[in-house]
Each structure stands twice: as C-alpha cells, then as structure tokens.
Amino acid sequence: VQLQASGGGLVQAGESLRLSCAASGRTLSSGIMAWFRQAPGKEREFVAGLRWGSIILYYADSVQGRFTISRDNAKTTVYLQMNRLKPEDTAVYYCAANTDYGGTLYSKEDYEYHYWGQGTQVTVSS
C-alpha cells in the first residue's frame, strides 16, 4: 500500500483546510487508518483515526469538535477536515494505515501502523 498525503498549506487562525490521503496498491477495506502530526521539536502524536467496517471515529482531545476524519465510498481516500485552526495545529501531518490490525477498536500508537504517507505541512499563523 502506498499512501500519498496532500492538502497542507499556510492559513490564518480560524480558517480551514482539508487534507487527503490517497491510497494506491490496494483498496483500504480492512484494518485501521489514522492521521498523525509532528510539530518541530515534539514527538509525533495521534490526531484522528477510523477502523474500516466501523462507524466509530476517534479523535485526540486537542482536535475534538474541530477536525473530522472521513473516507470515500471507493475506499481509496481518507480525509481530514480541519476547521477553526489554531497556531498550535502547525505541524507536518501524516496519514498511516495498518491493513491487518487485529486489535480491538483502534490504536493511537504510531508503531501499530505499517504504511505511512510522506507528510504534508500545515502552518497556521496567528
């Protein structure tokens, strides 16, 4: 599976962006997918995730109510709609997948994900 993240950019606080993660090599119909981010000097952190076959979506507390993760019906693209962006959302955003995840629900641990996109920069100015 190859993942290609896109949609980052420079915006002002309060504005919105939508990130896309396009998969190639196979459709994404099993396992888990997530968005992570890494700000300069900080560890990579979980942002949002989903499990294929489940309607439940998962969010970090810091983005709950502002960000929405979704998928397309063709199961080839996962999105992250980011609203009311804040300067502290500035980071490189990565999409990740584990197509064979056998755990319960989902995982917010980056080591559980086998496939990673290249990252897309999101910069929010105040």
Image: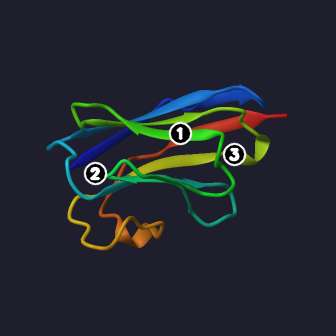
- The residue that disc 2 covers is 52
| Dot label at residue 89 | 3
- The residue that disc 1 covers is 68
Which numbered disc flags the more N-terminal residue, 1 or 2?
2
Q: Residues within 10 Å of mark 3 (few under 14, many from 20)?
A: many
| Residue located at (39% from left, 64% from top) | 106
| Of residues 56 and 119, the one drawn nearer to the viewer in this rendering | 56
User: In the image, 111: left or right of 83?
Assistant: left
* Distance between mark 3 and mark 1 Cα atoms: 14 Å
Which numbered disc flags the more N-terminal residue, 3 or 2?
2
Which numbered disc flags the more N-terminal residue, 3 or 1?
1
Q: Secondary structure at mark 2?
A: loop
Q: Position of residue 126 (x, y in %)?
A: 85, 34
Type of amino acid under label 1: Thr
User: In the image, 74: left or right of 123?
Assistant: left
Q: Is residue 9 depicted above or below 111 in this figure?
A: above
Q: Is residue 27 depicted above or below 18 in this figure?
A: below
Type of amino acid under label 2: Trp
Judged by depth in the image, the label closer to the viewer, 3 or 1, is 1
Q: Splitting the image into 4 quarters, where does residue 110 fall?
A: bottom left
